Amino acid sequence: MLNRKGMMMASFSAVIASSLLMGNATIMSAASSENESVAVAATGDSTLADMPAYLKSSVEWVWKNRMLTEGSTARNNTIFDQIDAGKGTLNYVVRWQSSKPVTLQQRQDIARMLGRQMNHWTEHLKGYDGWPYQDIKVKVVGWAVADPSLLLDKQPDEVVYTDTITDELASEKPEIPAVLPVAPEALSRYEHYWDPRYSYPGGYDKRFDMYLWVTENFVGGTGQDWGQRVNDDYLFSTLNLDEIEITEHEIGHGFGLTDFYEEHERPPGGFPTNTIMWAGDSDHITDWDIWMLRYTWSQLKKDTSRFPNTTKGDEGPIETSPDEIVNIGPAATASTSYTSPWENVSALNDGFDPTSSNDRSHAVYGNWPEVGTQWVQYDFDQEHTVSQTDIYWFKDGSGIDVPKSYKIKYWNGQGWSNVKQAKGLGTAADQYNTTTFTPVKTTKLRIEMVSKGSASTGILEWKVAANQ
């Protein structure tokens, strides 16, 4: 479980004034809303040098005097870190500390809302200074709720956690429910981000990066790298809005952006435009917020070891374009014709790069003692254009070997078809075997493997390249 005391002490957001809660009149700063403008989208070669001059001094002041001084990005678990570790994905658990029922439609709307609010931030990183991701795929991977009957019309594929602890805040504020549901600590990135070799049960795609923590009778909001906490009525009343002030504000803290409650916390002379990070100053993300986010990324990416999927070696950051090909394997649901009881099909897309074909430091996929033709499959939640796979074969010298041959197939909407003009189809050990083929649009991809002699087959990692 998350350590609540540590979470609350680490949070940069105090309770927001109740006048903010239900969309009441916003408190405006000295900066007039007339100074706000719509930020120009970044292009493939946009850098910090493109920041408008009128924003520069205040952004740099906040970075130096607030964020560096307070260490708001020091933990390698900001949303920047989470997205990079998930290769463009974020996983949430909804922590339902409320007595109100939630319909299936509302649960689906909550998932869409989280994706919408997150991408309102990250859309301003597209094409900016080596940021390689386009739309961030946000997924609700579970619900933590004390009373599962509150989840109306529960679906078979919905994951529900019912363990609870006591909410210490309830002793100070009796109106807050004392029973606090929790998801398994073993699946929490917040608890394990510091250990790059930690193996999540079921693979990295089964982890959750953050909570959306919904509390009955809670006033305002709070948030940091563990997630966002909001009032249940506020959640319901704003669920289908395009931009949601408190939720976006709290997500901002997840990127390391700070609050500005006291005068000494603000740049000398104030802000040149409004900001959503000063509670009540703006009900939407502004140019100042966008460039503070971009400036933060430009500073953090200098540590090339911190973002392994974004930077490479001595060459520094990879400059990317909106059409970059990225690995979508971690976003897939993996399945197979057979898995050995002590192996796990989730190893296919857990994001771990092996050091050899007998690397057992993480979970592996194998189908011993089966021989002949076996298959592994990726199912995606939307259609992708795919053109390449990279397979790292498992070979243990004890019954599992590289295959004699294999085919790559895609779902054509009615059945399985072989990809065309496949080049590669390698079976070398101790390396990724790349196969390119004519791009296809599909929601499913499959590898059909033919075993070599009496040996079974296995895979340590399977990457799929798609145009984003």
Image: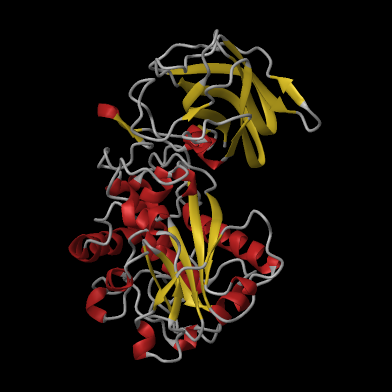
x%, y% of residue 195? 28, 46
Q: Is residue 220 visible?
A: yes
Residue 462 horizontal side relative to residue 447, left or right: left
Residue 51 visible in the displayed image = no
Residue nearest the viewer, comparing 192 with 421: 192
The image shows residue 432, relative to residue 341, as above or below, that is: above
Relative image position of residue 259 (x, y in whole percent): 33, 72
Dividing the picture into quadrants, the one containing residue 253 is bottom left
Quadrant location of the N terminus in the rendered image: bottom left
Q: Camera-side residue: 182 or 36? A: 182
Q: Is residue 190 above or below residue 331?
A: below
Tell which of 180 and 242 is nearer to you: 180
- Residue positioned 45% across, 54% down in the render: 208
Residue at image position (46%, 20%) is: 393
Display coloring: secondary structure
Q: Quadrant of residue 57?
A: bottom left
Number of marks:
0
Splitting the image into 4 quarters, where does residue 55 fall?
Answer: bottom left
In this view, the residue farthest toward the right is: 414
Tell me residue 113's x, y (percent): 59, 63
Whole-percent x, y for residue 165 in the image: 40, 74
